[in-house]
Amino acid sequence: MNPAEATIDCNHYPKRNVLSLEQLWKDKRSSNQQFQKEFTQKDRGMLRHFIRFVAPHDPYAVMGTVLKNWSQYADSVRYTAGLCGVPSQPSIPFLLKYCEQAVNYHLHQAKYTMRSVVNLTTPPKPVLMEEAEFEGQITLEEIEALEAQWALGKELEYE
């Protein structure tokens, strides 16, 4: 089977295939400026399984979150799975073996991010004060009159 033909069965993400995950992996790994071997058919097969295992979630988003925060993800897997050690660099077999934790980690990160996002597209509504709140408060004209008295050196007259 050609890797390009291995698309997700889920209708939500029809364009997510093995090649797009491979490209994401290469892009994220190249940002570390480290040597990376060429993908083998075995690697592509593991990515195909990863796509199937994380459905109905977006495998592209899950992998992106995990690669972006690899050390945190690996530490969470170490804690939840009770492992002694985890890979310090992203590993496809490790990601495939612990793909359930990858989805959970992605969902946790998305939930945390959604809480911290502020919608700046719509301005806040102005708070309208009722006229009753202004009773007993000084008006602009009164302030100007007090400023004029102060400028002339007169004693301020309050009502």
Image (spheres, rainbow, N blue to C red):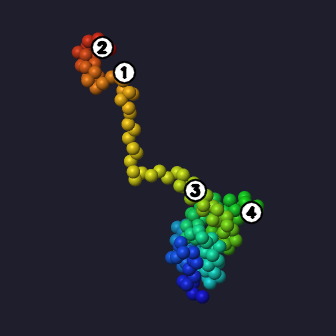
Q: Residues within 10 Å of mark 4 (few under 14, many from 20)?
A: few
Image disc number at residue 136: 1
**Residue contact at pointers 1 and 4, CB within 8 angstroms:** no
Q: Which residue is drawn at the image coordinates 52% and 67% (left, top)?
A: 31
From where the camera sits, is residue 123 visible?
yes
The nearer-to-camera label among 1 and 4 is 1
| Residue at image point 57% right, 77% down | 8
Foreground disc of the pair 4, 3: 3
Amino acid marked by disc 1: Gly
How many numbered badges does the structure rendering display? 4
Q: Which residue is mark 4?
A: 81
Amino acid type for the residue under numbered disc 3: Lys
Which mark is on residue 156?
Answer: 2
Residue 133 lies, in percent from the top left, at: 39, 28
Q: Nearer the viewer, residue 131 or 100?
A: 131
- Please tell me whether mark 1 sits on a helix, a strand or a loop: loop
Tell which circle, 1 or 4, labels the residue nearer the N-terminal end: 4
Residue at the disc numbered 3: 111
Q: Are marks 4 and 3 in contact (CB under 8 Å)?
A: no
Closer to viewer: mark 3 or mark 1: 1
SS of the residue at dot 4?
Answer: helix
